[in-house]
Amino acid sequence: MVYKPVLILAAHTGAAKDFANRIYQKLANHKNGCWRKYLLKEINIDFHPDKEIKVEILENVREHECYFIHDSSLYPQDWKESLLQVNDALMISDAAVINNVLPYMCYSRQDRPTGRTPISAALLAENIKSSGAKRVLTTDLHNPAISGFYRGISFENLKLGYTVLIDYIKEKHGDFLKNAVVVPPDEGAARRTSGYGKRLNLSSVSIEKIRDGKTNEILEMKIIGDIKGKNALIVDDIVSTGGTLCDAAHILKEKGANSIYAVATHGVLCKDKYGKSAKEKIEASPIEQLIITESIPRKDDGKIKIVSISDFIGEVIKRITHAESISELYEI
């Protein structure tokens, strides 16, 4: 059987261009070799004067398997609309298979109704499926159950925390780990933190928040476990305004923690309702380094360290196109 080349597609300008090129280089120069050929191609994503999004496929994609690498640095509304337009354009252009590579899944925290609100994560899933996509690759979802919204197409929630980030910490911060415990910044991160602890062979310490029953405001934060004189590795999936993360770091320091590092997959790093940025809070906190991936494109900045994920994504694409196991990547 003769296979047509697999196309790696990205906007010809913007943050995803370099990311897609590095994925392509990984595939083209794979150390174990690839019997399938890969080509890097371009898409134009632009704006009309009235801010409507315009998409154009700049290459012949007919009967090719396509992997569209999307730009997670776009505003969520632009991210969503351009994604759906690209899928539609690829479908109209007779692409054989449309795969969406979404390093950060926007709207993933809107995964359940609260009062009269939409389940935006489910709505996005329906939009992606109806736009022609046959597979979605994303990373470290806030709620893994979101994958259930994608019934009918292939869906991979890639575990960057258990692979790329842990490998980086082991390689760069071995001395730190010799006297460290893992810490979830809140109750919701406990399961993820347990996974880190298992893979790093570290015990865990937890933080309990005592809230006012009427206002839900935090009255007190308690440390459950021994932290005095130990290094603390705070583990989360998303750092948004940075409030929870920095509050956890302050209480850990007050209770006698030595060095404090934090690790998360997605660095949203936005401003809170008072206009204070996450970066400002992190720089003023006891956190010595925040380690995040490039799922949302950024560069090293002060205490913030960015870890590349392009080789890992390239390896996943190679395994899919060669009918090889992905789960093997997570084996301890």
Image (spheres, helix red, strand yellow):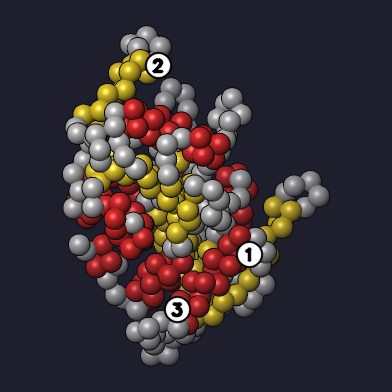
Q: Quadrant of the N terminus?
A: bottom left
The answer to whether residue 11 is above or below residue 233 is: below
Q: In this view, does 282 lie to the left or right of 143?
A: right
- How dense is the environment of label 3, judged by Cα within 10 Å: few (below 14), some, or many (20 and up)? many
Q: In this view, does 163 lie to the left or right of 279?
A: left
Q: Depth check: 304 or 88 in front?
A: 304
Q: Does residue 200 show up?
A: yes
Instruction: Give the residue at x 36% y 42%.
Output: 260
The picture places residue 180, in percent across and down from the top left corner, at 25, 46
Q: Depth check: 177 or 164 in front?
A: 177
Q: Where, by quadrant of the figure, is residue 94 drawn? A: bottom right
Give how far apart the Cα atoms at labels 1 and 2 are: 44 Å
The answer to whether residue 119 is above or below residue 265 is: above
What type is the residue that disc 2 sits on?
Answer: Glu
Q: Which of marks 3 and 2 is nearer the N terminus?
A: 3
What residue would you read off at disc 3?
A: 27
What residue would you read off at disc 2?
A: 217
Q: Does residue 149 show up?
A: no
Instruction: Give the residue at x 35% y 15%.
Output: 219
The picture places residue 309, in percent across and down from the top left corner, at 44, 63
Closer to viewer: mark 1 or mark 2? 2
- How dense is the environment of label 1, judged by Cα within 10 Å: few (below 14), some, or many (20 and up)? many
Q: In this view, does 147 lie to the left or right of 120?
A: left
Instruction: Give the residue at x 61% y 45%.
Output: 75
Tell me, for residue 11, which label it has, or none: 1
SS state under label 2:
loop
Q: Quadrant of the C terminus?
A: bottom left
Q: Is residue 206 left or right of residue 164?
A: left
Instruction: Give the residue at x 72% y 58%.
Output: 46
- How dense is the environment of label 2, judged by Cα within 10 Å: few (below 14), some, or many (20 and up)? few
